[in-house]
Amino acid sequence: MDLQILSFNDFHGNLEAPSGSSGRVAVGHAPDTADVDKDKNTAEPVDVNVDAGGVEYLASHLAEARKGHRNTLTVAAGDIVGASPLLSAAFHDEPTVLAMNKLGLDVTSVGNHEFDEGYKEIQRLAHGGCIDDGDGANNQNSCPTGSFPGASYDILAANVIEKSSGNTILPAYSIKNVNGAKIGFIGMTLKDTPNIVTASGVAGLEFTDEVKTANALVPVLRKQGVKAIVVLIHQGGTPNSEPWTSPVDGKTYQANPTYDYTCQGGGSLKSDSAILPIAAGLDPEIDMIVSGHTHQPYVCDVKDPAHNDRLVTSASSFGRLFTETDLQFDRRTQDIVRSSVKGSNMIVTRDTKDPAQTALIQQYKELVRPIASKVIGHITQDVLKGGAGINAGGESQLGDLIADAQLADPSVITGGDKPVIAFMNPGGIRSDLTYATSPYGEAPGDVTYDEAFTVQPFNNYLVSMTLTGAQIKEILGQQWTGSNSGSGKKILQVSKGFSYTYSGTTLGPVTLNNSPLVDGQSYRIVTNNFLQGGGDGFPSFTKGTNVYYGGLDIDAFANYLTSFNPTGYTPGPLTRISGS
């Protein structure tokens, strides 16, 4: 019998169509005739994009894809909630769960962002019920309509163990019977989740090895007569660049891969992609792998331990793509015919809106309006996290702004001891501040709470602490070592007055207010509680002493923007970090 599996990942509560680069998909390349990057080379490539994403369009595309398919399932690979826009986050992501119910999601794994508010919260989202959160404390309000039914789909967490009980926090697997075909789904997050989630969000939990966990469940499923097995895993890969020959000068350049280049168009995943050793180690009885986490598009065959091809997919993020996989189920063997498995990534173009999703969005837009529409500050131009707003060393305009806001926040001062350096993780900067954007009819350049929250959507707390100069240098070195080595390099954003240089993996001069940092001297610093807990591969933050918790990062950001009224904030030169 024919079977269809539709899949996506890393939706992150993007109910409305995402804007900017988060709402585009690369479909080709063209010469940079406008010299966008201002390097005076108009022959090199720029992406040719189409707008994509948004749950209204995702639901419509999935419904259209299901037509003519009697046997179909819709699955996901984690980060459905968390790091969400305000429309969802203001209500603890309850609107996103309701949207997933409406679009027909059958099963998903947890991802790392499902733990942003702790594992008890993802259990609540799965089972339903309300939080007594003070009816809007911290700009969040559970159950604004009076109730919340929870997810109608299965949320799986096979490798997340509650230490006190020894049990998984949610089911490890799910068996779906599609007209007599039993399909087993094993759902997992990446084992390194504690490294990239606030420590309080994973307290009391153990995250087990992905391969060992899934392989141990294969005989469990087989005892129940299930031979067709799919792994949903929140870990992924990064595509290699795409060669492109310019019609201007005939030279071949390395371009960003288009959405269907890896591996359907001849592309490949980088050799250090975390999903590759996992895919190579999973039991040959597992027929297919739906992955995520890296927000990249790919549909690739990776050899299993029996040296047979096995499909590994990922559909970018924010609902911009979904993967359609068609396969055959053999009723005699009760297994998937591996050679029949064919997948393709499909663009969620913005053509037709699903009425049920539109109604849900409109309902919550009215509920969130009093919070979202408040103007908190003004910018005189775009303030960017990438592109023209970032230098070769990795310093960005928005990174400077956020780090400076942390440094200026009075809530982290204790005993008169004011921080002198601020650090911000680049992955926590989720969107640009765009001058022309006016979602509530505000004047160009006005920044609403909604826009500010979209930049920093985690509701992290700011934390001040004392570190030695040597420890600070140790932290800077961790930007390109350990889990941040290779393609995983993470350049911390830093506050004004602090600067450093680097070359490759070698740290150069480090200065504070033009004076060299002294190894044995103590410095008061501020960061968010995510980094303070050692997140993103920066364990040396945990060495801080005299730790003091302040207010929320979004409040510091909003207050700092307000301090520039009425003239507004203008980004300065990118001179704090230099390197390559």
Image (cartoon, rainbow, N blue to C red):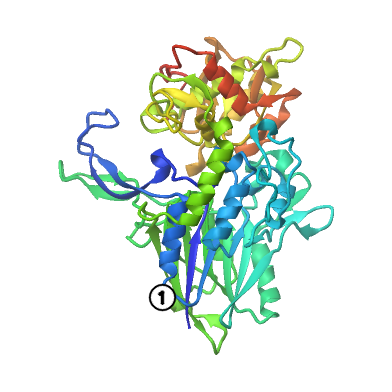
Task: Looking at this view, name the residue that lies furthest to the bottom.
Answer: 332
Residue displayed at 47% across by 45% down: 16
Residue 486 higher or lower than 511, as above or below: below
Disc 1 element: loop
Quarter of the image where one finds residue 321: bottom left
- List x then y, in percent, for residue 339: 44, 78
Residue displayed at 20% across by 38% down: 43
User: Viewer-proximal residue, 489 or 552?
Assistant: 552
Mark 1: few/some/many CA within 10 Å (<14, 14-19, 20+): few
Q: Which residue is mark 1?
A: 68
Quarter of the image where one finds residue 37: top left
**Residue 336 seen from this side:** yes
User: Viewer-proximal residue, 35 or 405?
Assistant: 405
Residue 439 higher or lower than 514, as above or below: below
- List x then y, in percent, for residue 305: 55, 70
Amino acid at the residue labelled 1:
Gly
The answer to whether residue 52 is left or right of residue 414 is: left
Q: Which quadrant holds the C terminus?
A: top left
Residue 418 higher or lower than 448, as above or below: above
**Residue 272 seen from this side:** no
